Amino acid sequence: MNGNKKKILIVLISMLFITLTVNGQNFFFIGENSYPCTEESFALQSNSDDGEDLNVLFAKDGATAIIALTTKSSLSGTLFSGKLIIYLDDGTVITCMDRGESFYVDDTAQAVYSLTNEQVNKMKNSNINTVRYTLKIYNIKEVNRSASNKAFSTKDLISKFYNNLDSVNEVADKKEQNPKKTKLDALMGGLNNEKGQSNGDSYATSYYGSPGSGNGTDGYGLSGRSLVSKGKVQQECNESGRVVVKIVVDRNGKVISATPSVRGTTNNNPCLLEPAKKTAFTYKWNTDSNAPNQQIGYVVVNYTLVE
């Protein structure tokens, strides 16, 4: 009898945190993706009388650190939305941008956010105190929530799990230090280049092509890789213009980071930046085992008004 109770408890815990252990490896499952994650997860206590606790664990997407969140919700279609703000005990404030992975399944909202190497190092030195986040309900109502850590030592868990992890920013910084790339960037400005530039590396940081015109995705650049598929997310406002999104792509051809409103953008209205960012995440390139862990490129999205 006791043995059956233990089995039921294990199943319930697995459903709550949406994780699974395979051959000794823990995974966090979200959408069509799975990420190796910490064996331990912890709950932050909701600061709202009607709010559910926020369950947190840490994971890896290749060489990128990510934080995974889940919270129970009886309202179908509840999603995490926008940025995540993390407050540490030492007063440090960390802001994580939405990477476009938020789902609702089994009465649970779930999402993952990328962490830079600098952010991980800060969290290795001080415990998480409070996390602020936003839930979007039925895609029409947004609710701001916060949850606080009462006793868990997050810095020990993070230090152990991210022992030797390179992040997107660390790899990007190394590329930016390349003098040839810096000189080329200054000369070309990344905007007037119609065929892209290379500094001798077939996987060098890419420059986007001619922006073109029309209402959709009209340009991109990722040296040494071929585009497999793409989509587009339409704007829902009376705004037009070009948005250039800087992307980071892994060896599997997946966009793991997207930063809209880089040089070449002509309209910085949030109602264009957000769909452009989501559009960038729909892009998929060929798998290449010889490519860098993180490769930098660009996606250009042109928005026009349809009369």
Image (spheres, rainbow, N blue to C red):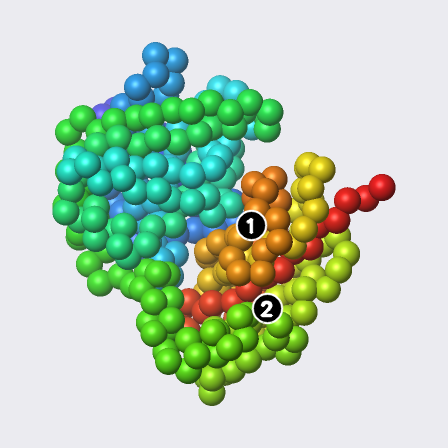
Q: Where is residue 183 in the image (x, y as percent from the top left)?
A: 44, 79
Q: Position of residue 137 (x, y in %)?
A: 54, 24
| Residue type for callout 1 | Lys
243 over 239 or under it: above or below = below
Which residue is identified by label 2?
A: 191
Residue 277 tag number? 1
Q: Which residue lies furthest to the bottom in this view?
A: 200
- The residue carrying pointer 1 sits among few (fewer than 14), some (14 to 19) or many (20 or more) residues within 10 Å by Cα, namely many
* Separation of marks 2 and 1 at Cα, in angstroms: 19 Å
284 over 123 or under it: above or below = below
| Residue type for callout 2 | Leu
Q: Residue furthest right?
A: 307
Numbered label tally: 2
Q: Can residue 21 be seen in this view?
A: no
| Viewer-nearest of discs 2 and 1 | 2
Question: For this rendering, which residue is in front, 210 or 119?
Answer: 210
Of labels 2 and 1, earlier in sequence is 2
Question: For this rendering, which residue is in front, 162 or 257?
Answer: 257
